[in-house]
Image (spheres, rainbow, N blue to C red):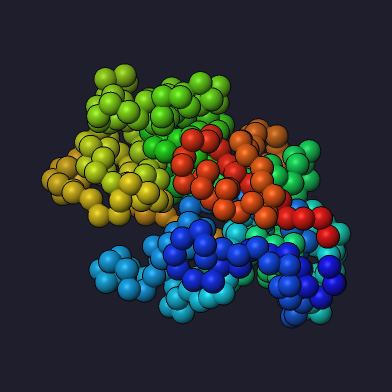
Amino acid sequence: MAESVMQAVVLSGVGGLDQLQVRYDVPRPTPTGAQALIQVAACGVNNTDINTRTGWYAEDSSEAAMGWRRSATGLGFPRIQGADVAGSVVAVGPDADRRLVGQQVIVDPWVSRAPEWQMLGSEVDGGFAQFCVVPAVNAYPVHSGWSAAELASIPCSWSTALNMIERANVVAGERVVVTGASGGVGTAAVQLLRARGAEVLAVAGASKAPALADMGALAIPRQGGDPAASVRQHVGDVDVVLDVVGGPDVGNWLGVLTRRGRYVVAGAIAGPVVPLDLRTVYLNDLTLAGVTTYGPDLFQRLVEIVESGSVSPVVSGVYSLRNIHRAQEDFMAKRHVGALVLLPDPV
């Protein structure tokens, strides 16, 4: 392969898996200004990839019609997806710190912040490729014994989990429910909460209970009706609910919160429009928060947590980049625990 081109998965538009094409003639990016060129060693798969491909963030979606917009500029195609980049810096632009060159890094996926929020792999090209360009300040050197695939499980999922926990102000001894606990965000939240000394109730499929129990959580099976009722039956009221599922159970989760409890949401894979009785909120002095974005200081704290050795990566599947269709099919099937990761061909 010529040095001027690279392997990449190109998303040509909104639709099914047929919109994802593995190509070997994509121009290799060049860093300018304060940018860094990352040779991608691994890139995780997450819900943002699926939502971008299927048009969940589209300007004409029902969510946008209700006043919700993710980006003022919207999404453009063709696009290289992939928000969870781990790799090494091979070059920098003239205005970037040259000491980054040669460093193993993970990349903060929020490459632009207010007023124009842009995420790697959605509003700008990402890491489903052999190389990607990011602002140099988004490339965080990391020193650990983890593999590239394990490091690629971190950026999007773990920053989301840490953001939820910090927005909820969780402290030691509190009782916290994590919905969708077997996914990338969920397994991250379980570990980060346990490290804070919280009591964790992890809601997931029954087959995933042993893995969550090994992480120190009390597993609550999702099947069989109302998981919030199961939580109340096991432990009574809880202090915090961290929800990445949404859907029809939201009102039930609010009902299991203690007075002045906190509900934090960062996903809606079971549905974004939910029934809600506001009396539950105001009569119980509840706090509701939605989280997506965060400041760069949070990602630095996440790197420090990884380097401390107090948490462990959870990767259940590793795929060649050329098998992107299989990886996204398996991700959407939700049979895995933790993360699924893609590896580009060696350069």
Would you identify the image quadrant in which residue 340 lies?
A: top right
Observer-nearest residue: 325 or 159?
Answer: 325
Would you identify the image quadrant in which residue 238 lies?
A: top left
Identify whether 97 is placed above or below 341: below
Locate residue 156, reporting x and y percent.
Answer: 56, 52
Locate residue 95, reporting x and y percent.
Answer: 78, 78
168 on left or right of 60: right
Residue drawn at x 32%, y 73% as measured from the top left: 60
Observer-nearest residue: 317 or 306?
Answer: 317
Identify whether 184 is placed above or below 156: above
Q: Would you say residue 128 is visible in this rendering?
A: yes
Residue drawn at x 47%, y 40% as measured from the top left: 334
Locate residue 223, reporting x and y percent.
Answer: 32, 28
Looking at the rendered image, the quarter that the C terminus falls into is bottom right
187 on left or right of 317: left
109 on left or right of 206: right
Observer-nearest residue: 25 or 69?
Answer: 25
Locate residue 282, reporting x and y percent.
Answer: 17, 47
Residue drawn at x 85%, y 72% as measured from the top left: 2
